[in-house]
Image (cartoon, helix red, strand yellow):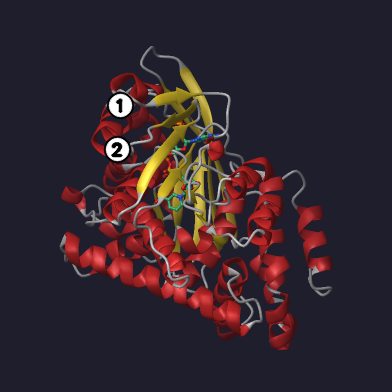
């Protein structure tokens, strides 16, 4: 790490004790922006890095709700509004039992750079709750969402803060959240949430966008190496929103996804994952991934082992943070993997990233590779503002163009700063420079 950044990082550690994921996310950025610090002494004078590491606002609130048997539950809600230099706060909500303040801060910090990389006018935020929607009835999920919004609404607005989905928050949850916001405020303010259903202000391709974007980014990484997804065996971890639509696009681009997972284990289907069956199991029936293997001959369900042991040329971790460790990265390299793209946020541990990069594996960090979701959200905001709705084809073409541009921005910035092929350096410096320039122009706020 650049010596000027070390005391700043130490202060982040001291002031945010125990928030290890937040520390990890900050370290990753500070370790790669050293060359930009040398080139722009004016940023140091304005204390830009110190300000970027401190959220503008952090909201924590109680969320009481009642289950179907009349039992009362208390969860904790969060919204961390990290940086609004480039536009209204923008970033998803995560409902998962593992959510702590440090989780939301890591995600919000990453979001600032990711949103800057898209080139669109959006700031960075993240939120969520330690509520676990799995196994809950629709009515329970609705009651939770209504209680969550009863507090959160006062902090939102189409020009202020615009949440979207993330783990555990899909179209169902966003519908309930939007319904409650509309009821409380008496305003049909479509642009206040993105990822909505198509009948109430949602946009084509938002559901598919993160996965499709991740596949487009991988296609670009392979293209500059004179290669493509055509004929490649691919492993995609997870089987949620990002994973399912990554698989769909990889198949359309000629690759074959041979394994996917959930938190109970993974399925290996050497002839290629049957996407209709996977959607039925995970999106319609909300079953565990083992149900896929029970319904199709030739597929096996494996638990207690790592999905990264399945041989592949391309790997797309799309489940959760720190799911691809050194052992996983070593197995990928041993089996001839040539490219890894992060569909999830920070799924690869720092040591595993080093293993992959040292072995010459092309590595696309989540900030760049999974930015398709938030980019499509910004397009949804654009359509809401003009009361317009674009076709699927037009929306997908815009998404692809944005991903190609993000790839080019990372690739060219890495070259410009003396780290050719290093997308981590490229993404972090390109995102940082855009936010820093805007913060400088806005004065000390
Ligand atoms: P979902 O809740 O739809 O799916 C998450 C998937 O990951 C599920 O299959 C889940 O399995 C699995 N999973 C969770 N924890 C583990 C674990 N410890 N080991 C293996 N599998 C696990 O979430 P999304 O698909 O929306 O999000 C996935 C990742 O992508 C997250 O990191 C998110 O932040 C990131 N992301 C999402 C965006 C979006 O638009 N949705 C945008 C950009 C990034 P189970 O059901 O068993 O829990």
Under 8 Å from ligand 1: the CB of mark 2?
Answer: no
**Percent position of residue 177, x then y:** 34, 42
Query: Label for residue 282?
Result: none
Q: Secondary structure at mark 1?
A: helix
**Residue 14 lies in quadrant:** bottom right
* Side of 294 relative to 357 (left or right): left
Query: Label for residue 138?
Result: 1
Upstream in sequence: badge 2 or badge 1: 1
Q: Are marks 2 and 1 in contact (CB under 8 Å)?
A: yes
**Residue 37 lies in quadrant:** bottom right
Camera-nearest residue between 321 and 168: 321
The residue sitting at 56% across, 86% down in the picture is 441
Q: Kindly identify which residue carries mark 2.
A: 172
Q: Residue furthest top?
A: 69
**Percent position of residue 244, x then y:** 34, 43
Camera-nearest residue between 274 and 322: 274
For the N terminus, the quadrant is bottom right
In the depicted structure, whether residue 26 falls above or below residue 441? above
Query: Does residue 89 show up?
Result: yes
Camera-nearest residue between 22 and 141: 22
**Disc 1 packing (10 Å; few <14; some 14–19; many ≥20):** few
For the C terminus, the quadrant is bottom right
Camera-nearest residue between 303 and 24: 303
* Side of 128 relative to 211 (left or right): right
Q: Secondary structure at mark 2?
A: helix
In the depicted structure, whether residue 6 falls above or below residue 203? below
* Side of 348 relative to 387 (left or right): right
* Side of 274 relative to 126 (left or right): left
The residue sitting at 25% across, 54% down in the picture is 187
């Amino acid at each position: 790490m650049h010596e000027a950044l070390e005391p700043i990082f130490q202060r982040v550690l001291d002031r945010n004790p125990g928030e290890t994921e937040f520390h990890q996310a900050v370290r990753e950025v500070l370790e790669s922006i050293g060359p930009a610090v040398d080139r722009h002494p004016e940023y140091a004078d304005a204390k830009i890095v110190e300000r970027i590491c401190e959220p503008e606002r952090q909201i924590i609130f109680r969320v009481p709700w009642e289950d179907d048997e009349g039992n009362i539950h208390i969860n904790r809600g969060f919204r961390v509004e990290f940086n609004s230099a480039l536009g209204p706060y923008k970033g998803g909500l995560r409902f998962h039992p593992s959510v702590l303040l440090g989780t939301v801060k890591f995600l919000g910090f990453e979001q600032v750079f990711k949103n800057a990389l898209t080139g669109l006018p959006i700031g960075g935020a993240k939120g969520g709750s330690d509520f676990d929607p799995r196994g809950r009835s629709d009515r329970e999920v609705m009651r939770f969402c209504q209680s969550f919004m009863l507090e959160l609404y006062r902090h939102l607005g189409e020009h202020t803060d615009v949440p979207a989905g993330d783990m555990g928050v899909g179209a169902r949850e966003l519908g309930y959240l939007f319904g409650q916001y509309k009821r409380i405020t008496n305003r049909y303010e479509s642009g206040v949430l993105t990822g909505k259903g198509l009948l109430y202000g949602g946009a084509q391709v938002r559901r598919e966008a993160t996965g499709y974007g991740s596949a487009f980014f991988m296609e670009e990484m392979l293209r500059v190496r004179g290669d493509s997804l055509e004929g490649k065996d691919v492993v995609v971890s997870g089987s949620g929103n990002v994973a399912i639509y990554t698989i769909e696009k990889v198949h359309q681009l000629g690759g074959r996804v041979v394994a996917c997972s959930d938190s109970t284990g993974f399925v290996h289907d050497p002839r290629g994952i049957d996407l209709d069956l996977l959607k039925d199991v995970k999106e319609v029936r909300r079953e565990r991934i083992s149900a896929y293997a029970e319904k199709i001959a030739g597929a096996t369900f494996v638990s207690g082992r790592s999905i990264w042991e399945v041989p592949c040329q391309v790997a797309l971790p799309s489940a959760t943070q720190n799911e691809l460790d050194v052992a996983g990265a070593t197995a990928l390299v041993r089996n001839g993997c040539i490219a890894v793209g992060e569909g999830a946020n920070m799924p690869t541990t720092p040591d595993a990233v080093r293993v992959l990069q040292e072995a010459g594996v092309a590595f696309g960090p989540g900030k760049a590779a999974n930015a398709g979701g938030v980019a499509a959200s910004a397009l949804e905001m654009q359509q809401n503002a003009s009361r317009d709705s674009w076709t699927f084809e037009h929306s997908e073409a815009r998404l692809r163009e944005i991903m190609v541009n993000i790839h080019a921005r990372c690739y060219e910035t890495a070259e410009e700063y003396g780290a050719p092929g290093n997308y981590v350096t490229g993404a972090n410096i390109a995102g940082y420079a855009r936010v820093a320039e805007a913060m400088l122009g806005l004065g000390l706020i």
